[in-house]
Structures are given as structure tokens and as C-alpha cells.
Image: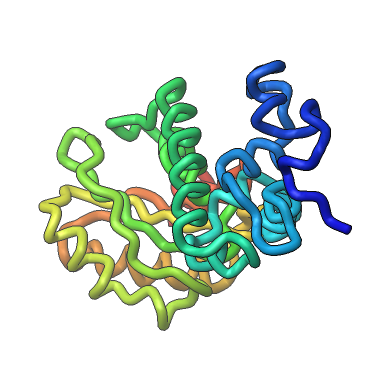
Amino acid sequence: MTLRLAEHPELDRPRERFWLRGPAALTAQELLAILLGTGTRGRDALAVAADVLRTSDGSLRRLMTRTAAELARVAGVGRAKAARLLAGMELGRRAATEADPAPQRVGGPADVHRYYAPTLRDLAVEEFHVLALGSQSQILADLLITRGILNSSLVHPREVFRAAIAEAAAGIIVVHNHPSGDPTPSADDRSVTRQLVDAGRLLDLPVYDHVIVGGERYVSFAEAGLL
């Protein structure tokens, strides 16, 4: 028979442990259970929290990349609790970036990686972004162009440069992630980059670099002499 959370011994209840030991003493499952608040019929908040963690193989970083719709489909979660979970994790992400704020200007590919790694390194799908830069290399905008598998048919120069021109960019850096964690450029990566560099020359809107994020690593086409 499954116990309701209130029927667990007091010291095993996440909220009581929170007040007795502090949040740092709680497991990720217990913290999620507190955010959930309640479970569902036959399953308490701890059991539902365990199911939530299983959607990301126990990784909180990967859990942050789940959409609200994905979390809402977990039995016992639903839309309201999914919103609560993602709001709590977003607050944590913002607190972390305050300690290491994203650069406002780009001095090289390391700055680009620092800007994008928190959002791209754990994604399960590829995203292709354009970093629009001003004349002093200041960041004007981060523009999401596509989400999905990267190839030359999905990333069209027209979409890339239309977005950059709308921001009055002096130049751009294109960025995408490899969900595998290996940032080594593929044949499609090289093909897309050649097309964009050629189009940029025609439009007098240079492509300064293409940076591929793979987990904690990155590859810069400019550094590697691939532009």
C-alpha cells in the first residue's frame, strides 16, 4: 500500500526536513516534491518527483531543457505544476548567471561559448542561432533561426540575414549546438558555413565566426581556419 506524504515519518517528509536541515540537505527528488506540493491518486509527491527526474535520466540540467508540455504529461504533474517546476528552475538558472554574467561584447569565441553554453549545452535537439553584433562588437540580439536537425536546406541564408538586417547588425556570429556533446564540425556544418560566408560577402554583412557548442566544449571555425 502506498503511503500518502503526510503518512511518512515526520523526518522523511521533504518539507519537515527542509525546515530542520535546510534546503542544501535535501535531495533533488525532495526539492522537486516540495515544488510539486501534492501527488496524485495512489502516488505521493515524492513518487511523482521521481518520475519527473526519470524524464531526464536524473540530470537537473537536462530537466531544465524539458518543455512545459513534456513535464505536464508526467502523471500527477499537469500544467500548473509543470509551470511551477520550470519557474523554480528558471530562478535557479538566473541566479547562477548573476554570478557569471553573460558578456555584453564579444572579444572571441570563448565569450560566445560563455554566452550560449547555459542554454545550448544540454539540449536534446540542435538549435541554430545568430548573434547580431554592432560596430563595436557589442551584442545587439540573440536570434533563434531553426530548431531541429541542422542541414543546408533548413538554415537558409535568407532567414539568417533577414533577421540580422532587422537588428541593424554590423556583423554576425552563427552558433549551434551538437546534442552528442562532440563539437566537431560535420560536413553539413561546413556546407552551411560556406553558404553563409558567401552570402555575407555579397550583402556586406560579414560572418565573423561559426561556433559549435558541444557540452562544455566548443569549436570555432575562425580559430580553426575553416571560414
For the residue pair 153 and 2, the one nearer the viewer reads as: 2
Horizontally, is 128 left or right of 81 in the view? Answer: left
* Position above or below: 22 against 108: above
Q: Residue at x 39, y 50 (%)?
A: 209
Q: Nearer the viewer, residue 173 or 94?
A: 94
Quarter of the figure with residue 75? bottom right
Report the label total: 0
Relative horizontal placement of residue 167, taking residue 72 as reference (left or right)? left
In this rendering, the answer to whether 221 lies above or below 162 is: above
Which residue is painted at 70% across and 33% down in the image? 14
What's the residue at 23%, 44% (across, down)? Answer: 133
Residue 196 image-quadrant placement: bottom left
154 or 97: which is nearer to us?
97
Q: Residue 227's x, y, as percent?
A: 42, 56
The chosen color scheme is rainbow
Residue 34 shown left or right of residue 84 in the figure:
right
Q: Residue furthest front?
A: 7
Question: Residue 202 location in percent, x, y?
Answer: 19, 67
Image check: 164 left or right of 16? Answer: left
Residue 91 percent across, percent down from the top left: 44, 35
Give the camera-side residue of 146 and 23.
23
Name the outermost residue toward the bottom.
153
List x then y, in percent, for residue 180.
67, 59
Task: Give the residue drawn at x 83%, y 56%.
Answer: 2
Q: Quadrant of the N terminus?
A: bottom right
Q: Is residue 58 above or below residue 9?
A: below
